Image (cartoon, rainbow, N blue to C red):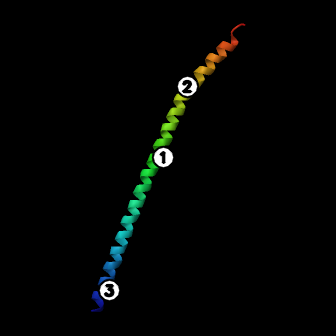
């Protein structure tokens, strides 16, 4: 009988371990989704910044040309 008790305890421990592993995987998956969203947001901001940078450079060039015009 002691072996069946040990087997029962072992099964219970394995079940708990399996549940903890599943919970950990769910938490990690949730965090990965959040990180992926943050990376996409940063990418979008960088793209927008690059787009605006060209416009700003163009405006600066045009303003400089206007300032250099004679009176």
Residue 60 lies, with reference to residue 22, above or below; the image says above
The answer to whether marks 3 and 1 mark residues whose Cβ atoms lie closer than 8 Å is no
Quick one: quadrant of the C terminus? top right
Dot 3 or dot 2, earlier in sequence: 3
The mark closer to the camera, 2 or 1, is 1
Q: Position of residue 16 (x, y in %)?
A: 36, 74
Q: Residue at x 38, y 67 (%)?
A: 21
Which element is circle 2 on?
helix
Callouts 2 and 1 close, C-beta under 8 Å: no
Q: Position of residue 57 (x, y in %)?
A: 59, 23
> Disc 3 designates what residue?
6
Instruction: Give SS at disc 3.
Output: helix
Q: CA distance from mark 3 to mark 2?
A: 72 Å
Residue at x 36%, y 65% (from the top left corner): 22
Position in image of residue 52 (x %, y %):
55, 28
Asked if residue 30 lies left or right of residue 45, the reply is left
Residue ID at (47%, 45%): 39
* Mark 3 or mark 1, whichever is nearer to me: 1
Which of the two marks, 3 or 2, is nearer to us in this view? 2
Number of callouts:
3
Q: Residue furthest front?
A: 71
| Label 1 packing within 10 angstroms: few (<14), some (14-19), many (20+) | few
Tag 3–tag 2 contact (CB < 8 Å): no
From this view, report whether residue 29 is shown above or below residue 6.
above
Residue 4: image x %, image y %?
A: 27, 87
Q: Earlier in the sequence, mark 2 or mark 1?
A: 1
- The residue carrying mark 1 is 38
- Residue 1 tag number: none
- Give the spatial CA distance, label 2 vs label 1: 25 Å
Tell me which label, 3 or 1, sits earlier in the chain. Answer: 3
User: Which mark, by number, is residue 54?
Assistant: 2
């Amino acid at each position: 009988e002691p072996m069946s008790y040990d087997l029962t305890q072992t099964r219970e421990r394995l079940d708990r371990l399996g549940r903890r592993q599943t919970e950990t995987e769910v938490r990690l998956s949730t965090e990965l989704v959040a990180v992926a969203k943050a990376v996409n947001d940063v990418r979008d901001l960088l793209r927008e910044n690059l787009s605006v940078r060209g416009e700003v450079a163009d405006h600066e060039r045009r303003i400089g040309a206007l300032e250099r015009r004679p009176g």
